[in-house]
Amino acid sequence: MKKVVKFGGSSLASAEQFKKVGNIIRAEESRRYVVPSAPGKRFSADTKVTDMLYGCYAAAENGEDFTEKLAAIKDRYQEIIDGLGLKFSLDEDFEVIRKNFSEKAGSNYAASRGEFLNGKIMAAYLGFEFIDAAEVVRFDENGDFQSEITNEIMSARLEKAKNAVIPGFYGATEEGRVITFSRGGSDITGSLVARAVNADLYENWTDVSGFLIADPRIVKGSKSIETITYKELRELSYMGASVLHEDAIFPVRRAGIPINIRNTNAPADKGTLIVEATCCQPKYTITGIAGTDGFAAITIEKAMMNSEVGFCRKVLQVFEDNGVSIEHMPSGIDTMTIFVHKDKFEEKEQQILAGIHKAVDPDHIELESDLALIAIVGRGMKSTRGTAGRIFSALAHAHINVKMIDQGSSELNIIVGVRHDDFKNAIKALYEIFVLTQI
Ligand code: ASP
């Protein structure tokens, strides 16, 4: 049994947190490959080390004195080293960093030091080998990630290591120029390592016990999801549920390795298991509910629209020409409605309206903003009759008007559009009918 364990910033924010992580790793011999993030926040008003590094480097780039800023970063690490009672010094590393900052080594290099240094401490603390991610995660000269080359280099390198710490979030070009993934990218490194060593499981340790059925800021005490498929997760993350970096899914998914989201602060909790497919029936008809607001709808009306060949294409072309992507497109007999992100649309509003007039000469165009979309997602819906009925009766009972309905043919989700003001109540009503009053 081989496991890759990735720990997020809050799991490594202090010596106290490091000790919890140490106990988790030592509890199972199979936890052989460790991917750490940089130290995160110790309390809510705290600053993540990655942000401190960006700030410090910006000062260096502007030619300002960055001594104090760098010293504050060093203090964060020293506090961890001292708290763990390690005889280990980062003095030399900080000297190199100071020099590279003065020579303007780039903000990617700067940010990557958060994981690099934390990885070194972690390796010293566990007695594991330290493998610099710059050696095993490859980007090309344009900064594009090279998945296949990375997999080759990484598998060959890790084969030789019984246990190893590989810092998350960054890699390098062949020439050694450091490049980072986007924020939260240590999740991706964990996934790459899992694929490279052909792990049985990728454990992603964070500060929540997995995915919750609904956003806990809206539904207090929401229950968590035990098992979710990659497809369901994709639907929920599209709608704003986020625990894991989206790009972290592909490497393990193609290798058939499940991901287990676990809680460093509650290691006895089973968390959420993300799998390709499962026979295990979900506990409730739905797996999760997620939603986002900030959508606008453009409804275009024209008599006999349905018989006008190419009508939809011409309308869509206008959006494409203006670089605005379309989220949903429900249509009627003589109407079609286009849902877009409000912010993106607003920038191009007048050009798009003029474009539609010119392209299809509609009878009428109506705009509505401040809309929210809610996705009710679940593999269990396919085999259950009456799901849509329950959704609409729950919303009707809560006096919520449904502005749009969209069910994909996969029957994996039903998306409803509601007014922004009804957003939270709609999610509460749906949670209540599917989870609290489950039949
Ligand atoms: N430390 C990086 C960030 O704050 C990457 C990560 O934590 O995954 O975004």
Image: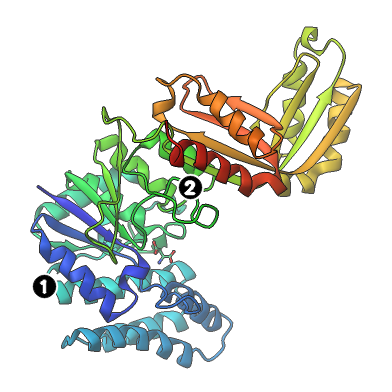
Which element carries disc 2, helix, strand or loop? loop
The answer to which of 407 and 315 lies nearer the viewer is 407
Residue 25, above or below 330: below
**Residue at the spot x=33%, y=85% of the render?**
94
Query: Which image quadrant for residue 234?
Result: top left
Query: Which image quadrant for residue 251?
Result: top left
Q: Label 1 vs label 2: CA separation? A: 40 Å
Residue 179, above or below 408: below
Q: Is residue 267 visible?
A: yes
Question: Around disc 2, counting alpha carbons within 10 Å, would you say few (fewer than 14), some (14 to 19), or many (20 or more)?
Answer: many
Q: How many marks?
A: 2
**Residue at the spot x=46%, y=38% of the render?**
437
Q: Which residue is mark 2?
A: 214
The answer to which of 97 and 327 lies nearer the viewer is 327
Q: Amino acid at mark 2?
A: Ala
Q: Is residue 79 left or right of residue 439?
A: left
Q: Are marks 1 and 2 in contact (CB under 8 Å)?
A: no
Q: Is residue 207 left or right of residue 375?
A: left
The image quadrant where one finds ligand 1 is bottom left
Q: Which residue is mark 1?
A: 127
Which element carries disc 1, helix, strand or loop? loop
- What's the image's color scheme? rainbow
Question: Around disc 1, counting alpha carbons within 10 Å, would you say few (fewer than 14), some (14 to 19), or many (20 or more)?
Answer: few
**Residue at the spot x=11%, y=65% of the render?**
26
Q: Amino acid at mark 1?
A: Gly
The answer to which of 63 and 167 lies nearer the viewer is 167
Query: Residue 392: x and y, percent?
Result: 61, 29
The answer to which of 243 and 324 lies nearer the viewer is 243
Query: Residue 329: x and y, percent?
Result: 67, 27
Query: Residue 114: x and y, percent?
Result: 37, 73
